[in-house]
Image (cartoon, rainbow, N blue to C red):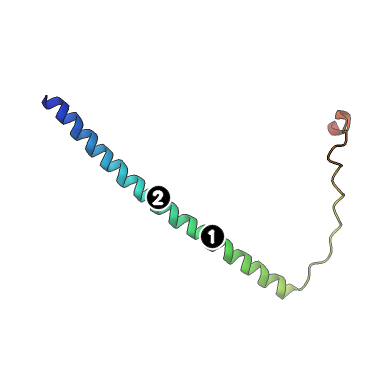
Amino acid sequence: MMLLWGIAGVALVASAVSWMRVRRTSRQLAQLTEAYWELKYQHLELRAQLQRALGPEPESVPAPPPPAAGGFIPLASLKR
């Protein structure tokens, strides 16, 4: 009978430790997510400032139009 109480006690301690680790990891994830979005926002602000400082971008060569959605494309042309 004491063995069962010992197993239950060990399981309770293990679950409490696991619960604390999950909470800590959750807080760390929230902090990392917040830092990511803050850095992304700052990056976009700096990019906009740089664009304003340098002026408009020179126009690049336009990309060719994508192929028709339902068109047939032979395999031989894909291998080239």
- According to the picture, the residue beneath numbered tag 1 turns out to be 37
Tell me if residue 35 comes above or below residue 74 in the rendering: below
Quadrant (top left/top right/bottom left/bottom right) for the N terminus: top left
Q: Residue at x 57, y 66 (%)?
A: 42
Image spot of residue 58 (x, y percent): 82, 66
- Left or right: 41 in relation to 50: left
Q: Residue at x 85, y 52 (%)?
A: 63
Q: Residue at x 47, y 55 (%)?
A: 32
- Left or right: 69 in relation to 22: right
Q: Residue furthest front?
A: 70
Quadrant (top left/top right/bottom left/bottom right) for the C terminus: top right
Name the secondary structure under disc 2: helix
Q: Residue at x 16, y 30 (%)?
A: 6
Pointer 2 or 1: first along the chain: 2
Residue 61 badge: none
- What is the three-letter code of the residue carrying label 2? Ser
Q: Residue furthest bottom?
A: 53
- Left or right: 7 in relation to 74: left
Image spot of residue 14 (x, y percent): 26, 37
Image spot of residue 28 (x, y percent): 41, 53
- According to the picture, the residue beneath numbered tag 2 turns out to be 26
Image spot of residue 34 (x, y percent): 48, 59
Name the secondary structure under disc 1: helix
Q: Quadrant of residue 4?
A: top left
Cα separation between marks 2 and 1: 17 Å
- What is the three-letter code of the residue carrying label 1? Trp
- Left or right: 19 in relation to 38: left
Crowding near pointer 1: few (<14 within 10 Å), some, many (20+)?
few
| Numbered marks: total | 2
